[in-house]
Image (cartoon, helix red, strand yellow):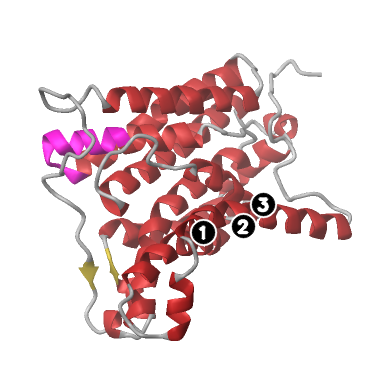
Amino acid sequence: MDFFTNVVVATLVMGTSLTFATIGEIFTEKAGILNLGMEGMMLLGALSGFATVFYSGSLLFGILVGMFAGVFLALIHAFLSINMRASQVVSGLAVTMFGTGLANFLGYRLGPAPSFNLVGMNLPVKFNAIIVPFLSDIPVFGGLFRVSILTYFMYALIPFAWYFMYRTKYGLALRAVGENPRTAAAMGINVNKTRYIYTLIGGAFAGLGGACISLYHTPSWNENMTGGKGWIVIALVIFSGWNPAKAIIGTFVFGGIMQLQFAIQAYNGSSAFMAGLKSIPGQFFGMAPYLITFLVLAIMTVISSLQHKQFSSPSALCTSFAIDDK
C-alpha cells in the first residue's frame, strides 16, 4: 500500500504542473488561438521562478515571476497572431524556440559568481507537503492529501475552470469567440480583446506550470528541464476534449507513467512482479508518455472517423479575425 500511495503522491506532484499548463492552453484554444509556444513558456517560467526564489527566498514571489515570464512570451504570441495576423503555428514555434534559447542562456548568466551558473544551486526554501489528518491515512488514496499547497490549489482550479467556462456569461463569450468570431462580434463582444485576455491567461498558467517543475517537482534548475512537457500539454488538450474537468484524467495518466520508473527503482520489497518491472529498461518508461501521446491521438482519430466527425476543437481555432473581414 505504501508503494501505491507514494506513486499517487509522485503522480500528483508531476501532474500539478501539467494540469496548470493544460487548463491554460484549453482557455487559449477556446478563444480560437493555438499556442504551440507552451514548451518555451514553461521553460522560461521554470527558470524565472527558480532564480527568483534562489535570490529572494520567497516562494510566492517566485511563482508570480514565473507566471509573468509566461505572460511575457504569450504577449509576443498574441501580438503576432492577433494584431499582425501571422500564422499561429509559426508564431507558436518561434515562441518555443525563443523561450527555450532565452531560458538556457540566462541559466548560465543569472547564477552567483564566479561561475554565474544556476545549475546545481540549492533553494533556501521549498514547498512542503500539507498533510490532512485522517484523510491522509486512507490506503492509496491518502496520497491525495499529502501534497503541497500548489496541488490543493489545482484541486480547486479544475471545478472553477469548468464552471467558469460552461456556467457563466464570460465563459459563453469565450466559447462564442472560439466558435464563430463574426457572430460574437455582432453580439457586441470584442473578439480581439477576448483573444488577448485568454492568450495571456494561458501564458500565465504555462509559466506557473514551469515554475512548479523547478520549485516543486524537482527543486533545481537544469538546461531543458521541461523535457518536452509543453508538447505533452498540447496532446492533453486534445485528450481532454477541450474540457477543463477532463484535464486531470490525462495528467494522471501521463504524470503517473513519468513517475512510475522512479517509484519502481526506489521499491525495496521482494515482490516478483516488481522485480519484473525493475528489469524493464528505464529508457522505455522515459519514452512511454510520448508513445502514449501517439496512441491517444491515433485512437481519437479512428473514433472520430467512425463517428463521421472531427475532433471537438473550436471551429475558429487558428483563424485570424478583423472587423472588416468579409
Where 198 falls versus 307 (above or below)? above
User: Which SS class for mark 1?
Assistant: helix
- Cα separation, mark 3 vs mark 2, equals 5 Å
The residue positioned 53% from the left and 42% from the top of the image is 25
Residue 294 — which label?
3
Q: Which residues are magenta?
A: 47-59
Mark 1 and mark 2: Cα distance apart in space: 8 Å
120 sits left or right of 2 in the view? left
- Residue 65 appears in the figure: no
Q: How many marks?
A: 3
- Residue occupying image coordinates x 86% and y 55%: 305
| Residue at left offset 70%, top offset 32% | 181
- Locate residue 131: give its quadrant: bottom left
Q: What residue is disc 2 on? A: 292
On the picture, is 319 further left or further right than 33? right
Verify CB contact (< 8 Å) between mark 3 and mark 2.
yes
Q: Of label 1 and label 3, which has the lower sequence position?
A: 1
- What type is the residue that disc 3 sits on? Phe
Mark drawn on residue 254: 1
Residue 14 at x, y = what percent? 39, 57
Please state, as top left, top right, bottom left or bottom right, where the N terminus lies in the image: bottom left
Quadrant of residue 4 in the image? bottom left
Instruction: From the top left corner, tell me how far across and down residue 325 is, in percent.
Output: 76, 18
Q: Is residue 53 magenta?
A: yes
